[in-house]
Image (spheres, rainbow, N blue to C red):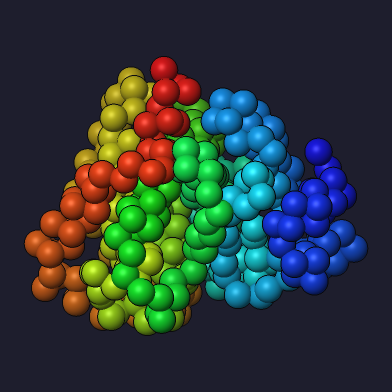
Amino acid sequence: MNYDTEIKLAKEKDAINSADIFDFRGTPFEYLCDDFYRFCRQHLNDNLKNYNIDPSIFIYTGYFDSNAMAQYKNDTFSIHINVGLIKNCADNYLQNKSFDEYLEKQYSDIIKNFDNPITALAFQVATQFTYYHEFAHLIQFEKKRQTITLQERFVKTSTYDKVKQHLETNADTLASIAIASHIQQYIKKSFGDKITQENAEFTIIILCSCLLNHIANFCDDLPEIYYKEHKHPHPFLRLFTVNLNIINYLNQSDFFKEKGIDIKINQVFKKVLDFYEELEQNKIFDTEITETMANASKQQREIVEYMGDLIQFDVTDYNNAVEQWNKNFQ
């Protein structure tokens, strides 16, 4: 399937309003959109039968806010990515000169080992995480096969929905596992036999910090932590569990164990938060993380209890995306 076919099928299945479709070809976003489209389309093609999600459409929408959506409608699965998400990820990571300059000044001995700028890897991690998250929703929808739409961006006016909060958390878990595997591959490719505890940890910290920023940007008021409200868990609760999932996966990696590298979960997670706070202090990012962390530190027990309950919540109408994913990797 090519992008012309995606557009045609999206219109035929009424998956999207025709006016909302974004044709990236011939636009300033062509290279980035085309590269990401090819990655996503190939992964979808490889997994249509594994998860019984055929037909599945991948389409860009012409909105410039950072958002994405998964949908089941008219017997068709679809992933919708706002062009604004691609632009924002490019602005925040790939084309963020102040970020590049800061890393070059502070960590030149490590970043010289990367074939591509680590900010380019950060762009890949952020966008690919979004894809895997939406892909997880398609897996979830396959069981019930009734019209449903889930957007990535936090909507403050939405009413509390525990089922949808669980689906979001479950999708985050699958995306975390997939991205952790990519991060390990980046480290293995970049350092080879020269891999050390320091450069492995550094790569994890940088990429997890950028993913933290990516998730934080789905909310306009990060410090205001909530629980039983809205259809999405609060972004800090999401980034908390996402980063812990990634670090936990890498902690169990046979590859790192063979190299004598110990990814200590609590220690590395704290370093991610500390480094992100450092980036905000140096005006690289701006999501009020210091105030958010101060609020979260007063609610540690509530956060752990709420997320534990949400993760374990039994949803019978939808597939557990992580369970389905693991079945295909046994």
Between 301 and 87, the residue placed more toward the observer is: 301
Decide if residue 150 is on the left or right side of residue 230: right
The residue lying toward the viewer, choosing from 21 and 64, is 21
**Visible in this render: residue 173?**
no
x, y (%) of residue 328? 47, 23
Q: Tell me which corner region of the image, top left, top right, bottom left or bottom right, holds residue 281.
A: bottom left
Quadrant occupied by the C terminus: top left
Q: Residue at x 33, y 64 (%)?
A: 161
Which residue is situated farthest in the right direction here?
Answer: 26
- Which percent across, then down, holds residue 213? 44, 66
Image-based side of 16 in relation to 194, left or right? right
**Figure check: 19 above or below 50:** below
Q: Residue at x 75, y 52 (%)?
A: 13
Q: In which quarter of the image is the N terminus?
A: top right
Is residue 324 visible in the rendered structure shown here? yes
Residue for point 54% across, 59% down: 149
How many numbered callouts? Answer: 0
Image coords of residue 216 (percent x, y): 41, 69
Q: Which residue is drawn at 38% across and 51% down?
A: 167
Nearest to the observer: residue 192 or residue 33? 33
Q: Quadrant of residue 23?
A: bottom right
Residue 122 left/right relative to 106: right
Image coordinates for residue 180, horizontal then vertical, percent: 42, 40
Q: In this view, does 309 lie above or below 179?
A: below
